[in-house]
Image: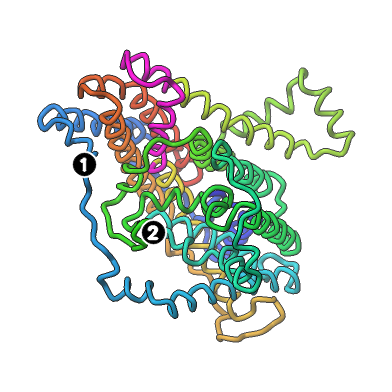
Amino acid sequence: MIVPSASRRLVRAIGALVLAFAPCEAVAHAFGARHELTLPLSAYLWAAAAAVALSFLVMGLVTALVGRRAGASGPIRRFDLGATMIGRLLANRIALAAIRTISVALFLLVLATAAFGSPDPLANFAPTFVWVLWWVGMSYISAFAGDLWRLVNPWATLFAWSERILPVLRKPRWTYPEGLGVWPAAFLFAVFAWFELVSAAGEQPRVLLVLIATYSLLTWTGMALFGREIWRERGELFGVFFGLLARFAVTGWDGERRRWLLRPPASGLNEAGPASVSMTVFVLLTLSFVFFDGLRETPAWAGVLQWVTESMTLRPGLLALRDAGFDLLKVVQTAGLLAVPVAFGAAYFLFCRLTRAAAGEGPGTVALAGAFAHSLVPIAIAYHLAHYVSYLLLAGQLAIPLSSDPFGLGWNLFGTTAYRLDVSVIDARRVWYTAIVAVVTGHAVAVWLAHAAALRLYVAPATALRSQLPLLALMVGYTATSLWILAQPVVKNG
């Protein structure tokens, strides 16, 4: 999940309100005062890392006592939500049509406000809806409730309606190559990340309109060429992203029997099977882009910028780029955006190679990377929750006055334009402890998923445990690093 530059301006605007109404400093996440830790930050980092390591020891002990069942690789009990009132409602064609019609109406409203509304992002409904309510909100819904995007995807709905009018669209022109995997979605994810984290292209409503229109054209072209369902599952960025997060959720879609099921959390990841190389890369992008977003708020990134500006080796090249019209800050950020996924991928494949060496048998490095890829998803969800919860609760309130005046024309449709943001809904202290709980829990679940995958790969439980030591070291290190990054904007001694 990525917070774009447009959204950062929204957050900075909230920070300005904090400054105006409270005698305290505004920081990157728009809090008043930073939280002062009762213990040194290093103590929290060591404790969190130790908790993750302890979860592995507990899993190893349980495996030794009860055998392979500790991996939870057996059948998991589920409950058919179709037997409930909500399930029957969602299965009702009229209700589904109404839900999808509302989704399309919101989609058209976003296009209309982006095209004809105020050019000021703070006075236009489109940026707030897209970057706060939809992008961040839908990510949380997908991760914890289920794949709602499958029901409300307006691109898929509009294409399905078009198929009824033009039956020729129902027949794909080409067969989707199996080797292509989810590479189209991964490529679009990288482009999306650059636009939102580096170029600030989504800041202005008119530019946002162009981005949505371009993505719509690409999506509908892919659906026309390869089929609506195939493209939605492999090529449509948001379908792949939200669907990946939804594997962690407590509900899941049974495509064969066409029903929604209630299930234990993360069981969808446990049963996902080995990931393809393209899906492994997609998972790594999900982790690395949000990591880069947080990294930019740390002294380490400030040090990188200072080193770049003072480097005599880089100076001639930077001056040449500046003279050619390039924005040097964007050049450096682009380099960072590219470097972080490369570093993540290199570290992950290195530790998978060490896993192969520790086990002494079994699949090779690439196969192991795919086998353990889904175990990284809870870590990504935990980091997203910790990093963006304050943003959702604060910037999300902008939708209340904008709902009455979506075009910024001075309307007051629902009498909410006078609403003032409540900055007390979240503070630095609650964000910090949310981060600790989320990161430790996410990594503990990741350890369990990796252990379950290892038990499926290796016959001997002892070999499975031994193989997990390198990945455990990686997860422990990432626990401490991610918490340190999350601490920088919210704690005094971070």
Q: Which residue is mark 2?
A: 146
- Report the front residue among 67 and 211: 67
x and y percent of residue 60 in the render? Answer: 19, 28
**Segment tinted magenta in the rendering:** 351-378
Q: Is residue 136 above or below residue 101?
A: above
Question: In the image as oriented, which residue stretches furthest toward the left?
Answer: 65
Tell me if 56 is positioned left or right of 422 in this view: left
- Would you say residue 297 is visible in this rendering? no
Would residue 115 be seen by someone viewing this image from the given angle? yes
Residue 156 or 382: which is nearer the viewer? 156
SS category of the residue bearing label 1: loop
Q: In percent of the image, x 59 and y 76: which residue is there?
A: 105
Mark 1 surroundings: few (<14), some (14-19) or many (≥20) residues within 10 A: few
Q: Is residue 264 magenta?
A: no
Q: Which mark is residue 493?
A: none
> Which amino acid does the dot numbered 2 rest on?
Gly
Image-based side of 221 in relation to 393, left or right = right
Which quadrant of the view contains residue 124?
bottom right
Q: CA distance from mark 1 to mark 2?
A: 22 Å
Q: Position of residue 125 (x, y in %)?
A: 63, 71
Q: Position of residue 49 (x, y in %)?
A: 33, 31
Q: Amino acid at mark 1?
A: Gly
Is residue 117 left or right of 95 when viewed as pictured?
right
In the image, residue 31 sits, relative to residue 279, either above or below, namely: below
Comparing 36 with 61, the one in front is 61
Q: Is residue 370 magenta?
A: yes
Question: Mark 1 highlights which residue?
Answer: 74
Q: On the rendered structure, is 350 left or right of 145?
A: right
Q: Position of residue 261 (x, y in %)?
A: 30, 60
Extreme residue toward the right, this view: 323
